């Protein structure tokens, strides 16, 4: 309210009606700016919320509002990255548009197979079905697609900890073991 009243002559400061009008208009302008910023946010997948349904419609993806917003955004990004000639780089780009991050693409041309190895984070991605579908949509039908996941193995634990008591004494949780 103070900013708008600064544009008025000083003799309006003490008039109650003018202050009420300025207050009402400043609240309206503030709401307008918030609404405009929200609409603008819908133009970008990374900031869209209620506008994701339009993006999904545009990309030919069924709208599923029960999915978390981040998974819906990942699916949209992968769909947009999967346009053009299919190359190893494109497959990698599409797979990396999901939350599990970094992947390696292993080609085995004589056996018509492609292996997507998740190396960025340990374990199976939460939305593996979406990743598989996105890759199946872009990879030619004559190629077999396989997936490999990275885990902490028993031997890796054995190298750091002599036995279970040593592991327990470390005080690490399961999640912390995955990081180390």
Image (cartoon, grey):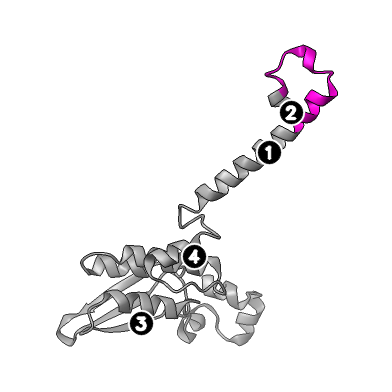
What segment carries the magenta color? 5-23
- Residues packed near mark 1 inside 10 Å, few (<14), some (14 to 19) or many (20 plus): few
Mark with earlier residue (3, 4): 4
> Helix, strand or loop at disc 2?
helix
Residue appearing at x 42%, y 67% in the figure: 57
Mark with earlier residue (1, 3): 1
Assess whether mark 4 and mark 3 are in contact (beta carbons under 8 angstroms): no
Assess whether mark 3 and mark 2 are in contact (beta carbons under 8 angstroms): no
> Helix, strand or loop at disc 1?
helix
Residue at label 4? 53
> Helix, strand or loop at disc 4?
helix
Residue at label 1? 28
Eye-nearest disc, 1 or 3:
1
Mark with earlier residue (2, 4): 2
* Mark pair 2, 3: CA separation: 62 Å
* Mark pair 4, 1: CA separation: 28 Å
């Amino acid at each position: 309210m103070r900013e708008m009243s600064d544009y008025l002559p000083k003799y309006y400061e003490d008039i109650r009606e003018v202050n009420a009008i300025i207050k009402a208009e400043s609240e309206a302008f503030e709401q307008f700016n918030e609404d405009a910023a929200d609409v603008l946010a819908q133009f970008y997948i990374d900031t869209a919320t209620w506008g994701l349904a339009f993006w999904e419609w545009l990309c030919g993806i069924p709208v599923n509002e029960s999915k978390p917003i981040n998974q819906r955004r990942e699916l949209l990004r992968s769909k947009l990255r999967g346009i053009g000639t299919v190359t190893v780089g494109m497959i990698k780009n599409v797979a990396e548009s999901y939350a599990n991050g970094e992947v390696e693409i292993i080609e085995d041309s004589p056996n018509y197979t492609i292996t997507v190895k998740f190396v960025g984070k340990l374990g199976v991605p939460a939305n593996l079905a979406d990743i598989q579908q996105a890759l199946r949509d872009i990879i030619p039908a004559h190629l077999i697609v396989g997936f490999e996941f990275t885990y902490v193995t028993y031997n890796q634990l054995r190298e750091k900890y002599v036995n279970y008591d040593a592991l327990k004494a470390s005080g690490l949780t399961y999640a912390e073991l995955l990081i180390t």
